[in-house]
Image (tube, rainbow, N blue to C red):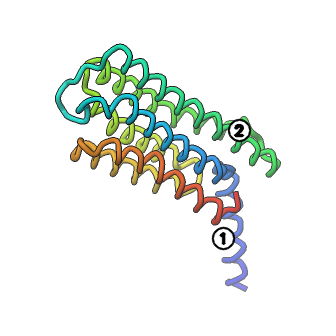
Amino acid sequence: MIEKYIEDIKEIKDIMNRSSRFVSLSGLSGITAGITALIGAYMAHTFVFAQGNYLTFDDRILSAEQFSSLLLIACGTIFISIGLVIYLTTKETKKRKQKIWDQQTRRILLNLSIPLFTGGIISMMFLIRGYVGIVLPMTLIFYGMALVNVSKYTINEIRSLGLIEIFFGLAALQFISYGLILWSIGFGVLHIVYGIIIKMRYKL
């Protein structure tokens, strides 16, 4: 009898946990975001980083053309990734007959946006001053912090992904000449691996 009560309590806790966490994050959205990041990294290498030694702690002022190219690639990668994540996650949410916009979604966006916007502003300050090499580690670190910050409202794997992103950001800061490679692994390969894990584990 006692064992039955314990099982019932565990089941109730599981139901409450599912209701308080956003669990409709699509695994496919992680995979597509990772592929988009890898394409963006390749384009950044081709049009910017291959033309000079910018992966250093020293200031290396970009030409107007290079600055525009890097900014366009970065914005394109971000907006395409976010667009795909929103579309695929919304599709998954509708399939599960869950609300798309509720208090939980607002909490996620708020806790995600504060570190991301802060990191974006700091990265832009570094970029304008010519510290191009530092921008790559900074984006990884602040993105990882954003994921850790929002992980309490979604699945546990988000926290692990965030901590790994921070690790790669710190590694990119230490080994700055390999910054673009580590950035590609952090934003590209890790997202693809994360997406595959989520798809297999949660069938999302």
Please give the name of the residue rendered at 53% of the width and 49% of the height, measured from the top-left corner.
Answer: 152
* 191 lies left or right of 120: right
In the foreground, 147 or 20: 147
Q: Residues within 10 Å of mark 1 (few under 14, many from 20)?
A: few
The residue pinned by badge 2 equals 87
Q: Which residue type does callout 1 highlight?
A: Lys
Please give the name of the residue rendered at 58% of the width and 55% of the height, measured from the top-left corner.
Answer: 195
- Dots 2 and 1: beta carbons under 8 Å? no
Q: Quadrant of the N terminus?
A: bottom right
As helix, strand or loop, the secondary structure at mark 2 comes to helix
Asked if 163 appears above or below 119 in the picture, the reply is below
Please give the name of the residue rendered at 21% of the width and 46% of the height, measured from the top-left corner.
Answer: 174
* 48 lies left or right of 147: left
The residue pinned by badge 1 equals 10
In the foreground, 193 or 20: 193
Residue 111 place in picture, x, y as percent = 51, 36
Residues at marks 2 and 1, CA–CA distance in whole angstroms: 34 Å
In this view, the residue farthest toward the left is: 58
Which quadrant of the figure has residue 135?
Answer: top left
Which quadrant of the figure has residue 68?
Answer: top left
First in sequence: mark 2 or mark 1? 1
Residue 191 place in picture, x, y as percent = 52, 51
Asked if 130 appears above or below 32 in the picture, the reply is above
Picture mark count: 2
Q: Quadrant of the C terminus?
A: bottom right
In the foreground, 175 or 114: 175
Q: Which residue type does callout 2 highlight?
A: Tyr
Number of the label disc, if any, that sits on residue 166:
none
